[in-house]
Amino acid sequence: MSFNNSGIVAIAIFIIVIILGAGHAVTGARVGAMMIRQPSSSLAHMFREAPAFWNGPECAADDGRVDIAMPLDANYLRGTMAAVLSILQHTACPESMVFHFLTTDADDRGLAAALRASFPSLDLRVYRFDPSRVRDRISRSVRQELDQPLNYARVYLADTLPADVCRVTYLDSDVVVVDDIRALASVDLAGHVLAAPEYCHANFSSYFTDAFWSHLELNGTFRGRRRPCCYFNTGVMVMDVVKWRAGGYTRRVEEWMAVQKRRRIYHLGSLPPFLLVFAGHIRAVDHRWNQHGLGGDNVEGRCRGLHPGPISLLHWSGKGKPWLRLDARRPCSVDYLWAPYDLYRYSSPVIEEW
């Protein structure tokens, strides 16, 4: 049996690909005029470094700080990277952004190292959220991801952040911001604890069970509110941290979680207890700041289109996440709006010209 040069090269490539796939710490190998690259398994090497962003001349050096809080989880790290990049890219004052990340991951240093590798100048702080704080308070919902302790960390945000944080903008990991986040972060709360886009045409009753609606004492919590049946999505919120602490709102949300454990009064994770406390009591902001539902429903994650009107923030709430659908080569049309912010390095061996 004889081989020409191209056949030998092909066999060599095949052998190296097998070696690379076996977990060896090899990041690249040269074969003839080609280079086979394999990213390291380290989180810090899974993502590209983002461009540097600098404040514009209009940014105040003393009072321009914007505090942003996000969950930090290895399974959603790719989404977090995209979200951070989109925020920095679209704000006039990227150096004024301070990011606070809450994580239950034991490898919190590895996650932080990955963020710092992609954003070397980013002002970021990572806080370890103890899962045991909520584990006994969580009731099973329609989707397993909604039952993770980190999904409830937003309830404890004011208890976790340092005392010098008076206002924070909370964002889920499956968003991209296409406007200056300062416009949302600086909204006039008008004395309210929370601000968020409000939706008054949703089927509000579907968030709660028949056991809730048939119990007059329980459903009476909505009586007398300004707009008691208006829904808001907790993946995008502006919080007055001082008022939250002073009003004991962590305890108020926990009390409804305790009722849920006894009576099963709602379906969806951490959202309903927020609605029970805050529905009709929030500062409503423009819908452009949460074009949510792009991940489809919570069961199948079917494709959904954009709602009409201007957009400042895209949110893939629901089961379908854009990075998973893109990788599976079954993207929805809206996923191509997320793709430009993806910093993920291709994880399979890549053959390129040397």
Image (tube, helix red, strand yellow):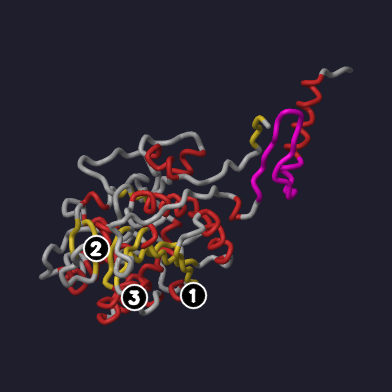
Badge 1 or badge 3: first in the primary sequence = 1
Judging depth in this view, the residue of 182 and 47 nearest the camera is 182
Q: Secondary structure at mark 1?
A: helix
Residue depicted at 41% across the width and 75% down the height: 160
> For this view, does 169 lie left or right of residue 149?
left
Separation of marks 2 and 3 at Cα, in angstroms: 28 Å
* Location of mark 3 (residue): 254
Residue depicted at 52% across the width and 53% down the height: 118
Whether residue 155 is situated above or below residue 294 in the rendered picture: below
Badge 2 or badge 1: first in the primary sequence = 1
Whether residue 137 is situated above or below residue 35 in the rendered picture: below
Whether residue 52 is situated above or below residue 216 in the rendered picture: above
* Location of mark 1 (residue): 132
Asked whether disc 2 touches disc 3, contact meaning CB atoms under 8 Å apart, the reply is no
Q: Position of residue 280 (x, y in %)?
A: 16, 65
The N terminus: image quadrant: top right
